[in-house]
Image (cartoon, grey):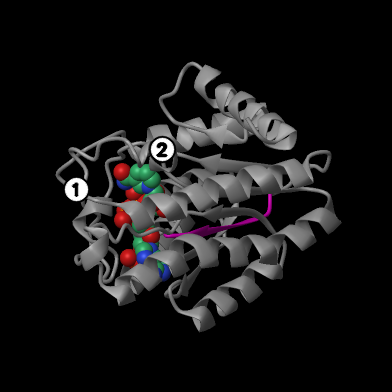
Amino acid sequence: MNARPGTALVTGASSGIGAAYAARLAAQGWDTVLVARRAQRLDDLARRLRAETATTVETVVADLSEPDDVARVARRAADDGVGFLLNNAGINGYGPFAGLDPGLMTKVLHVNVLAVTALARAVVPAMLERGRGTLVNVASQLAFAGSLPPDPLPERAVYGGTKGYVVTFTRTLAAELAGTRLRVQVLCPGLTATEFHRSRGDEPVPGREQSVHEEGGMPVDQVVEASLAALDTGQVVCVPGLADPAPVAGLAEAERAIRAAARRGGS
Ligand SMILES: NC(=O)c1ccc[n+]([C@@H]2O[C@H](COP(=O)([O-])OP(=O)(O)OC[C@H]3O[C@@H](n4cnc5c(N)ncnc54)[C@H](OP(=O)(O)O)[C@@H]3O)[C@@H](O)[C@H]2O)c1
């Protein structure tokens, strides 16, 4: 009899990449903890996964822009054998920086940065103790390309900044944990066919059924597939659709050159 893989906690499981990833993990036998604000969406997905996979599915309704909710989810993440954390919940808060609502700006930072970091901090110690575990943080290709000419996307300095944080945080943590048996990945999708652009993130997208924004993009299953394949090969930076790994390898080369130059100082 095959051992069950354990429990996976997925934030932003009520739609898009998170819902698809949770379904894929459940199909692999993972018990799941589904986290988001929309209780009905989580309940619908949980019912489907229980019926299709006979795994245990728990739902946790939480607003990850609220510190108390983050702390509650972190407590759940820290106990009872969470062996896979998908830090996926994210909001965009798009809009010209000078006019950005300070409340929305704070929410973007809370959901995209603080919650990701707090939940990673909650699971890593137990994973190290058990000698295994997987952490996938969802960033965006905008972490790299955010400063390129904006069209056709809206203004996005804060969003791009948060995703840059997720890339640097995850790559640096992966380096720190190299040599352990933890798998650490930052998933950097390009435009993906989800509800993402239907809300700036202050309020959830309404409706019981999942929808897709008008911009289209890569199907969610391809994003999940790319992430799982990269976990198998140990790739830390996963950019779905990027067939040639040279640009990602080039990042490290550029960083080494910058570090060497900065050490030499002057001229
Ligand atoms: N779609 C794209 O083009 C694209 C491209 C690159 C990266 N990404 C990243 O992919 C990740 C998933 O986004 P998606 O494309 O799948 O979009 P999505 O369909 O809008 O899903 C976002 C998920 O995050 C959850 N969420 C949002 N605010 C939350 C909060 N305050 N507390 C708890 N959960 C919250 C949403 O659930 P509730 O509303 O129910 O809370 C939803 O489940 C995000 O981190 C996003 O930045 C997306």
Q: In this view, does 140 lie to the left or right of 127?
A: left
Give, as a three-letter code, the residue at label 2.
Answer: Gln
Which residue is most to the bottom? 68
Q: Mark 1 points at which residue?
A: 213
Depth order, front residue of 233/3: 233
User: Percent from the top left, x then y, of residue 172?
Assistant: 67, 45
Say which residue appears at 59% left-offset and 23% top-offset: 249
Say which residue appears at 48% left-offset and 51% top-offset: 22
Residue 74: quarter of image = bottom right
Q: SS for tag 1?
A: loop
Q: Quadrant of the N terminus?
A: top right
Q: Residue 141 carries which label?
A: 2
Give the residues in magenta: 5-12
- Counting every numbered tag in the picture gives 2
Give, as a three-letter code, the residue at label 1.
Answer: His
Location of residue 56 with respect to 73 vertically, above or below: above
Which residue is most to the left? 214
Q: Does any atom of ligand 1 lie closer than 8 Å to the CB of label 2? A: yes
Q: Is residue 9 one of those drawn in magenta?
A: yes
User: Percent from the top left, x then y, of residue 165?
Assistant: 52, 52
Is residue 50 among the parts visible in the rendering? yes
User: Percent from the top left, x then y, of residue 267?
Assistant: 62, 30
The quarter of the rendering in which ligand 1 is drawn is bottom left
User: Percent from the top left, x then y, of residue 28?
Assistant: 57, 42
**Earlier along the polypeptide chain: callout 2 or callout 1?**
2
Bin the neighbour count of mark 2 within 10 Å (Cα to Cα): few under 14, some 14-19, many 20 and up.
Answer: some
Q: Is residue 23 one of those drawn in magenta?
A: no
Depth order, front residue of 140/254: 254
